Image (tube, rainbow, N blue to C red):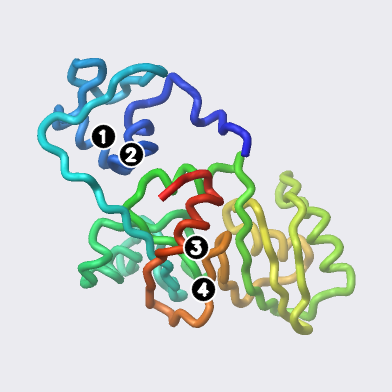
Amino acid sequence: MDKNPEDAYPMRINKYLAKQGISTRRGADELITQGKVLLNKKVAVLGDKVNEGDKVEMRGKQTPKKYVYFAYNKPVGIITHSPQEGEKDIKQSVETAPELRGVFPVGRLDKDSSGLLILTNDGRVTDRLLNPDYDHDKEYRVRTQDPIRDSFKRTMEAGVDIEGYLTKSCTVRKTGPKSFNITLTEGKKHQIRRMVSAMHNTVTDLERTRILNIRLDDLKAGAWRPIEGKELETFLEKIGMRS
């Protein structure tokens, strides 16, 4: 895997702390504001940048962080991030589960979509999994309002123009007159819905079933399971990390 340009120095200190697994970027900002981060023996401030060879330390006694990873089946109607009045997000949906305390969803699924999301307290995963410089395949089950045309598979796989952007090549498998599975290596906002719309059809149901080697399988809507053992080891290896 080629080195990601986003990993280059100088690097914002909150991003550096997230990549080291010390905190999320937002959590890192809080630690910096509280004066708990030292950069080359000096108290760091928001906006500081880390150069290669710089020494970043945490003040006070630090308890090694235990990383946790979960597969979660987001139901239709649940918001991934930033709910508006009357809406419910994933954090509210799992707040009663002690094992999920402190986790956050990696990436998004829109309100009308369902399926697999990864929940973790490991901020390093976000950069590794969502950065467009890496090709990480994700699979979806899709139903459409109208029957799928004969040219649908060929056109979708070659790339579709969605408002001036040509989508990358993908894999499509027709599963019924109005249904198909699609595997993408990118994740533009509402990409599948926009691709289908460009093909003069409408998505009526969309479910994410796989992210790399993590599969939804028979996980029920609103339920979660730990990602551990060989499954976790393979996942971290695929995104360029080690457990």
Q: Which residue is mark 1?
A: 29
Which callout, 3 or 1, points at the residue further toward the start of the chain? 1
Residue type of the residue flagged with mark 2: Arg
Which callout, 4 or 2, points at the residue further toward the start of the chain? 2
Which callout, 3 or 4, points at the residue further toward the start of the chain? 3
What is the secondary structure assignment of the residue under circle 1?
helix
Q: Which residue is mark 2?
A: 25
Q: Which residue is mark 3?
A: 109
Q: Position of residue 87 (x, y in %)?
A: 34, 68
Residue positioned 56% across, 63% down in the render:
213
Spatial CA span between label 4 and label 2: 28 Å
Above or below 136: residue 32: above
Which callout, 1 or 4, points at the residue further toward the start of the chain? 1
Residue type of the residue flagged with mark 1: Asp
Q: In the current view of this chain or complex, which residue is farthest to the left?
A: 60
Spatial CA span between label 3 and label 4: 14 Å
Quadrant location of residue 38? top left
Q: Which dot, 1 or 4, sits closer to the camera?
A: 4
Residue positioned 65% across, 74% down in the render:
142
Quadrant location of residue 55? top left
Count the marks: 4
Callout 4 crowding tier (Cα within 10 Å): few <14, some 14–19, many ≥20: many
Q: Are marks 2 and 1 in contact (CB under 8 Å)?
A: yes
Which callout, 3 or 2, points at the residue further toward the start of the chain? 2
What is the secondary structure assignment of the residue under circle 4?
loop
Q: In the current view of this chain or complex, which residue is farthest to the right?
A: 150
Q: Position of residue 97 (x, y in %)?
A: 23, 71
Q: Nearer the viewer, residue 42 or 132?
A: 42
Spatial CA span between label 3 and label 1: 26 Å
Above or below 131: residue 213: below
Is 72 left, or right, of 2 in this rendering? left
Residue type of the residue flagged with mark 3: Leu
